[in-house]
Image (cartoon, rainbow, N blue to C red):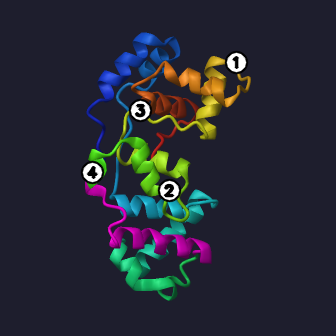
Amino acid sequence: MRAMAPDYWLKASRALARGDAVMAQLVRRYRGMSLVSRGDAFATLARSIVGQQISVKAADSVWSRFAERVGSVTPLAVVQAGPAGLDGCGLSVRKTEYLADLAGHFVAGRIVPARWHEMDDEAVIAELVDVRGIGRWTAEMFLIFHLMRPDVFPLDDLGLQKAVFQHYFAGEKQPRRVLAEVGERWRPWRSVATWYLWRSLDPVPVEY
């Protein structure tokens, strides 16, 4: 699937730059770059499970073996493979269970991507965290990077915390309440502000 930038990006970037000197600098620095969405919903969520608590290199290796084993990374293919079919991919027993649960949610219709456009952020998060192995942070990353929702603010993300402390508090840590208050100034574009803050820490564009 071709990478796509959200249609609101330019409008959001301009709004953030008008109201915040730090954002104005970051918007200028990363002009022409933006959040992009790749892949389909099931594959994106499955890959997030595979990559939990291991290095990017290790995750890529496991994912390649997993994709080769199932043939097509679809919910039905994972259900049909079963735990025995995934043995030898490098997946832990727990991650195999998580992938099976994710696939089961799709096959049984407990997760239906087509209806997400009618649901607000918290409703989508609630649906996703019902899957074993998917917590709120993973659901928020999915909202930002796959659904490209414009106003997600992942308070528990360490990179976001570090960037806010660095740019707005001279590197001094602040309580969660203060972080949330800072985020309020960026509504309704908190996902966009978060992307710029992540980008300021890493020369490689943030993708999910």
Residue 102 to residue 19: above or below = below
Residue 170's disc number: 1
Q: Nearer the viewer, residue 195 or 126?
A: 126
Q: Which residues are magenta?
A: 91-114
Residue 68's disc number: none
Location of mark 4 (residue): 2
Q: Nearer the viewer, residue 32 or 112?
A: 112
**Callouts 4 and 2 close, C-beta under 8 Å:** no
Quadrant (top left/top right/bottom left/bottom right) for the N terminus: bottom left
Which mark's residue is nearer the viewer, 4 or 2? 2
Residue 19 to residue 122: above or below = above
Residue at the spot 47% in from the left edge and 75% down from the top edge: 100
**Callouts 1 and 2 close, C-beta under 8 Å:** no
Distance from label 4 to label 1 (Cα)? 39 Å
Distance from label 3 to label 1 (Cα)? 25 Å
Residue at the spot 57% in from the left edge and 75% down from the top edge: 91
Which mark's residue is nearer the viewer, 1 or 2? 2
Which mark's residue is nearer the viewer, 4 or 1? 1
Q: Quadrant of residue 107?
A: bottom left
Q: Is residue 193 visible?
A: yes
Label 4 sits on what residue type?
A: Arg
Location of mark 2 (residue): 129
Residue 151's disc number: 3
Residue farthest along the bottom direction in this orientation: 84
Q: Quadrant of residue 80?
A: bottom left
Q: SS for tag 1?
A: loop
Q: SS for tag 3?
A: loop
* Residue 97 magenta: yes
Distance from label 3 to label 2 (Cα)? 19 Å
